[in-house]
């Protein structure tokens, strides 16, 4: 069977782009191969670990189980797109550093993008709700508490609330 290809137009990190992809290719493969978005990691490749998470129209998706052709007309954000115009880090990226929420770093981009979706909702979540919202990611270095604290800290900062005592 011959390969089929399709041209795909979408917005990647604020820039309109076009590429030609194999209709069977994953979004992960397209982002890494065609656009060198190395923050999009290949982990389990079955949508279980969260290492490949990207935001599509503001919603977190596992790009390994999302076909590249489905990107047509979408706005896709990778970790590379969170940086400011002069390479400055976003508030959630700074919080990950401040809270030592990075160890090996493999899971970090996916966690940060899911955290970005959570934080952009502008909602004050309970600890249990935050843990559930972050649960689609596997960290093999056991950095969960630091990651949780970084997200919670940023949530409180964005909501203009003081860090809860205790």
Image (cartoon, rainbow, N blue to C red):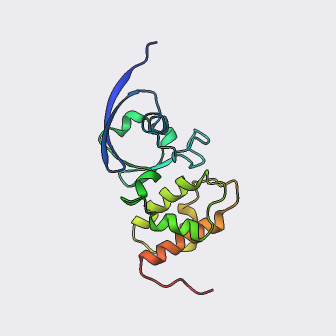
Where is residue 68 drawn, in percent x and y? 41, 35
Q: Name the residue nearer the viewer: 41 or 121.
A: 41
**Residue at position x 55%, y 60% in the image:** 134
Kindly indicate the quadrant of the structure image that contains residue 34: top left
Q: Please provide percent x and percent y for residue 137.
A: 59, 54
- Please tell me which residue lies in front, 63 or 85: 85
Q: Is residue 163 positioned above or below 46 on the image?
A: below
Q: Is residue 102 left or right of residue 155?
A: right
Relative to 3, does residue 103 appear above or below in the rendering?
below
Residue 106 visible to an observer of this rendering: yes
Residue 119 against residue 87 in the figure, above or below: below
Image point 58% across, 58% down: which residue? 135
Marker count (numbered): 0
Viewer-side residue, 79 vs 22: 79
Asked if one can make out residue 128 in the rendered structure from this viewpoint, the answer is: no
Give the farthest residue toward the bottom.
165
Q: Which residue lies at the image location 59% right of the left edge and 87% below the top edge?
A: 165
Image quarter (top left, top right, bottom left or bottom right) of the C terminus: bottom right
Q: Looking at the image, which residue sits at the far front?
A: 86
Q: Residue at x 61, y 54 (%)?
A: 105
Find residue 103 and report its image quarter.
bottom right
Which residue is at the far top?
Answer: 1
Residue 74 % position (x, y) = 32, 44
**Image-quadrant location for residue 159:** bottom left
In this picture, residue 49 sits left or right of residue 7: right
- In the figure, is residue 80 to the left or right of 71? right
Name the residue at the right extreme: 141
Q: Where in the figure is residue 7, as x and y percent of width and height?
A: 32, 29
């Amino acid at each position: 069977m011959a390969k089929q290809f399709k041209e795909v137009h979408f917005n990647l990190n604020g820039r309109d782009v076009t590429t030609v992809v194999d209709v069977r290719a994953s979004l992960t493969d397209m982002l890494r191969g065609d656009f060198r978005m190395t923050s999009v990691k290949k982990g389990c490749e079955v949508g279980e670990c969260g290492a490949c998470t990207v935001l599509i129209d503001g919603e977190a998706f596992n790009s390994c189980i999302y076909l590249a052709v489905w990107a047509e007309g979408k706005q896709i954000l990778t970790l590379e797109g969170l940086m400011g115009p002069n390479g400055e880090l976003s508030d959630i990226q700074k919080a990950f550093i401040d809270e030592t929420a990075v160890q090996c770093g493999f899971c970090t981009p996916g966690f940060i993008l899911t955290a970005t979706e959570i934080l952009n909702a502008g909602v004050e979540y309970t600890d249990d709700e935050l843990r559930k919202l972050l649960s689609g990611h596997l960290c093999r270095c056991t950095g969960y508490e630091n990651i949780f604290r970084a997200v919670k800290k940023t949530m409180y900062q964005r909501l203009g609330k003081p860090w809860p005592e205790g």
